[in-house]
Image (cartoon, rainbow, N blue to C red):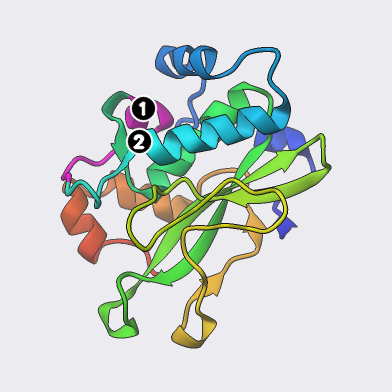
């Protein structure tokens, strides 16, 4: 993986989308985390909460679009672009550097049905001096992502022979193309089928 910035502080910044000062996010953090937890325990706890308790909009066939971390938490739903904002916000509030990573994947099961950019997070573990990637998209039949510090257990294996791609950069902020998709659409289902960006 390649860091967009060598300064870890850039992966702790609050932004419009990563709005960790929001009261709802602060309340959730206070509920999930406590001082006796290790860094690894906090990362695992935050990741699993967002993976399991925040629904993926497509999975529940919701038309609502969320973008900022606080919106995602308020409505308890979002697509991967939005869920990655919430995980970054939750971890950054705890002083744990978190960035944004992307994959180009088939939207469904064949290239003919098109491609999309999928968002996940890069998290820096100070205790281990390493970055790991975590995918809080949400598990379902055929999709299983787990917390792991050794071997990645992401939601989707990249099939390069099918035109899929792993982008190696850990970005400090959500990619502008993904945010534009969320802000320029009004129906999450129509957006998911026809409006997701296909490359960075």
Is 65 covered by the magenta stretch?
A: yes
Look at the picture and state if 146 lies above or below 33.
below
Look at the picture and state if 197 lies above or below 29.
below
Q: Quadrant of residue 63?
A: top left
Bin the neighbour count of mark 1 within 10 Å (Cα to Cα): few under 14, some 14-19, many 20 and up: many
* Cβ–Cβ under 8 Å for marks 1 and 2: yes
Q: Is residue 118 left or right of residue 90?
A: left
Pointer 1 residue: 73
Is 172 covered by the magenta stretch?
A: no
Residue 82, image x and y in percent? 39, 42
Numbered badge on residue 54? 2
Residue 24 visible in image: yes
Q: Is residue 107 left or right of residue 38?
A: left
Q: Which residues are magenta?
A: 62-73
Q: Residue at x 46, y 12 (%)?
A: 27
Residue 12, image x and y in percent? 66, 31
Q: Quadrant of residue 118?
A: bottom left
Q: Residue at x 57, y 54 (%)?
A: 101
Quarter of the rendering occupied by the N terminus: bottom right
Residue 140, image x and y in percent? 34, 53
Q: Residue at x 28, y 85 (%)?
A: 112
Residue at the front extreme, as displayed: 141
């Amino acid at each position: 993986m390649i860091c967009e910035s060598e300064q870890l502080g850039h992966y702790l910044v609050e932004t419009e989308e990563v709005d960790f000062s929001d009261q709802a996010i602060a309340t959730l953090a206070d509920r999930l985390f406590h001082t006796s937890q290790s860094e690894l325990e906090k990362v695992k706890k935050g990741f699993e909460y967002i993976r399991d308790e925040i629904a993926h909009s497509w999975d529940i066939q919701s038309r609502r679009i969320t973008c900022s971390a606080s919106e995602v938490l308020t409505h308890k739903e979002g697509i991967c672009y939005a869920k990655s904002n919430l995980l970054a916000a939750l971890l950054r509030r705890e002083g744990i550097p978190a960035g944004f990573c992307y994959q180009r994947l088939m939207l469904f099961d064949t290239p003919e049905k098109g491609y999309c950019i999928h968002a996940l997070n890069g998290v820096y573990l100070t205790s281990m001096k390493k970055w790991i990637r975590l995918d809080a998209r949400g598990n379902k039949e055929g999709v299983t992502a787990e917390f792991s510090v050794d071997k990645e257990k992401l939601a989707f294996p990249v099939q390069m022979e099918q035109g899929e791609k792993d982008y190696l950069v850990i970005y400090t902020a959500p990619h502008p193309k993904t945010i534009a998709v969320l802000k320029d659409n009004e129906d999450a289902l129509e957006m998911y089928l026809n409006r997701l960006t296909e490359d960075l």
